[in-house]
Amino acid sequence: MNVSHRLSGLTGGGSDGWDVFYKARAMKAAGTPVVELTIGEHDIRTSPAILDEMHRAARAGHTGYAAVPGIPDLRATVAARVQARTGVPTGPQNVVITPGGQSALFAAHMAALDPGERALYLDPYYATYPGTIRGAGGVAVSVPTQSEADFQPTRAALDAALGDAPARSLLINTPNNPTGVIYGAETLGIIADFTCANDMWLISDEVYDTQVWDGAHLSPRALPGMAERTLVVGSMSKSHAMTGSRVGWLVGPEDIIAHLINLSTHTTYGVPGFLQDAALWALRQGDAFEAEIAAPFRRRRDQTLVQINAQDIVRALPSGGAMYLMLDVRATGLSGEAFADALLDAHHIATMPGESFGASAAGHIRLALTVDDAALRSAVETLLQFAAHLASKAA
Amino acid sequence: MNVSHRLSGLTGGGSDGWDVFYKARAMKAAGTPVVELTIGEHDIRTSPAILDEMHRAARAGHTGYAAVPGIPDLRATVAARVQARTGVPTGPQNVVITPGGQSALFAAHMAALDPGERALYLDPYYATYPGTIRGAGGVAVSVPTQSEADFQPTRAALDAALGDAPARSLLINTPNNPTGVIYGAETLGIIADFTCANDMWLISDEVYDTQVWDGAHLSPRALPGMAERTLVVGSMSKSHAMTGSRVGWLVGPEDIIAHLINLSTHTTYGVPGFLQDAALWALRQGDAFEAEIAAPFRRRRDQTLVQINAQDIVRALPSGGAMYLMLDVRATGLSGEAFADALLDAHHIATMPGESFGASAAGHIRLALTVDDAALRSAVETLLQFAAHLASKAA
């Protein structure tokens, strides 16, 4: 029996650049200590206080089917938080709770696209983006960005990717995984103008919105005319170290949210009530709780930039947020994949090749700042010496 | 901005027969006591022992991203349970864990169907079935069954629904919601022959497989040649009173499961690890635990049939399993919807009109046996007197 073409073609053929990651995991499984700077997951666990609240809610009986749109208090709290941070009037009717940010990303594309319609996304990209578009039946169209322009998208690149054929949506991510860059007013203005001019949905993945190192997070939904065409993906995963709890949401126009609730009835039937209670409790702890979760990544970014600025072989992309640093290692003469593979072999330090995230990040590696400060400092020191050694051989 | 046609057309227009349900909920919210025999949810909560195990796993640190296919022990335990109950060789590679049975239903249709392909389902049906097919881009084609034939599908009806156009899949549910009937060897043989003859997927929703009152549960996956074309939907919801935990699975051929894992990466990114640990613990409690969850529904079916067999206005469909009884109320002269509405108004007893579940169940009502035995006995007594009164007026 054959699977649908949709599933057989969900991800591209050949190596997807994750060979280094799997090799590192295999080395660890075989007993070799590996410093893993690969996956975007905190080095802390979910707070016991959140887990105790989850248990309290479950033991109190919140174990039956929860309301599919999300429990009213959580929808209202997410809405109030979005409104406070963006200034856009937002009510519970603008929010649907989903089992994690990935589910929200998929649902957004299900709402924006009919089968065969084109959907744009920016390269480099989070690993699931093109497959998510294809899963929703869309044709995934990448928009390249340039390391030299700090991976900020340009109007020319957007127009070139669109070409003469219509597209229904553009997917962006700020703060950005994998690059760590944020989109400021200028870039978001370009994106807003482009989606308005072409009557497109903007799907804005803002799951790192509490990890912004300079200034405040800007949401494109707050720009003039954008609230009606923007679907914002949010999540408890990064902001509250709740990656495994799978609680996220979509924020958007009320009529679209109503359709998305109907979709949830048919794709997931909602999110466990006791998990929503735990998320609600966590959100009510306020900004200080979230700042504490984010602080290590800023501190590690700062210490790593000091190390990188002391040499001139490896260039760091300007990191404005999220838990990553993207490093340009082209001066070593190696691809990102070859560099990451050699670094793993020689020093048991695992990083993600830029190629894992699209052609635009070739010759780069991504560091996840997800080991303790001292281990990170030592690994970066080794990495830079390794790069210098390679560069001197290449020269 | 317009939503996709897929979402705008997900569910049919007009009343979907749930008006009585919403009216009952509104009455309750306004303070009127209502006996609710509507929703398929246990009158007990999830066992505190399961919840304590969930908390233990979470506090022990299982709060990060869990393996997207499901944790190995849970996949293996589900596989062993399926093999023990069906005799079909089943390993962890045949299992993907999903966030609930509804998610498994959706994923199965995503695997079976490309956009525009036809998918069959049996009427009467669980409320989400046609929308799930449409959400996966398919064309939902209903196959009528007859009350007089105990809602068992016939080959003639299957052939007529198929007509001259191909279809990719047939969705069945045994034990059946809403009818409570089970499909025996004869019906499953017809279904197997039909899907083989037309090279179709069989999607078999068996979430009530621990609630079988006469004999053992039969899974069509166990029939000759069927394992390669059958995707079985399972869940912790009904068997372990874990409706709100959203833990389910699909069982199927290894190559298809591999594709479904890839789909999960793009639609949900897996199921919380501590929920999987709790499900694993619950499954390891064995048959006695599940029998205890199921027992009240058998007991209530038996007591209700005694009441119904003492009169001849209302006919009960032969209930072989699940937590429902389907009653034929056509002798009252009313539609199922009118009867349920009048019963709610007159006696504050809420039932589901058969019409909620498709045209084949017109003139019927579904009772969910989800209130305590005494309350159920009293409600059924009132219901039967009400029906007799209506029938005498109609005569």
Image: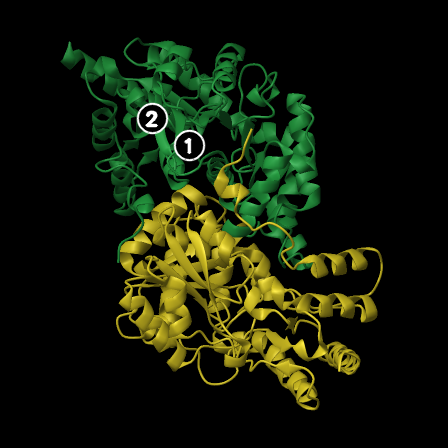
Chain colours: A green, B yellow
Q: Position of residue A103 (x, y in %)?
A: 49, 42
Disc ID at residue A379 = 2
Q: Which residue is farthest front? A: B395
Q: Which residue is farthest right? A: B31
Q: Residue at x 36, y 72 (%)?
A: B191
Classify mark 1: helix, strand or loop.
Answer: loop
The chain holding disc 2 is A
Q: Amino acid at mark 1?
A: Val
Q: Residue at x 27, y 11 (%)?
A: A313
| Towards the viewer: A376 or B205 | B205
Mark 2–mark 1 CB contact (< 8 Å): yes
Q: Is residue B304 left or right of residue B242?
A: right
Q: Position of residue A268 (x, y in %)?
A: 52, 51
Disc ID at residue A371 = 1
Q: Is residue A291 left or right of residue B88?
A: right
Q: Residue at x 36, y 59 (%)?
A: B169
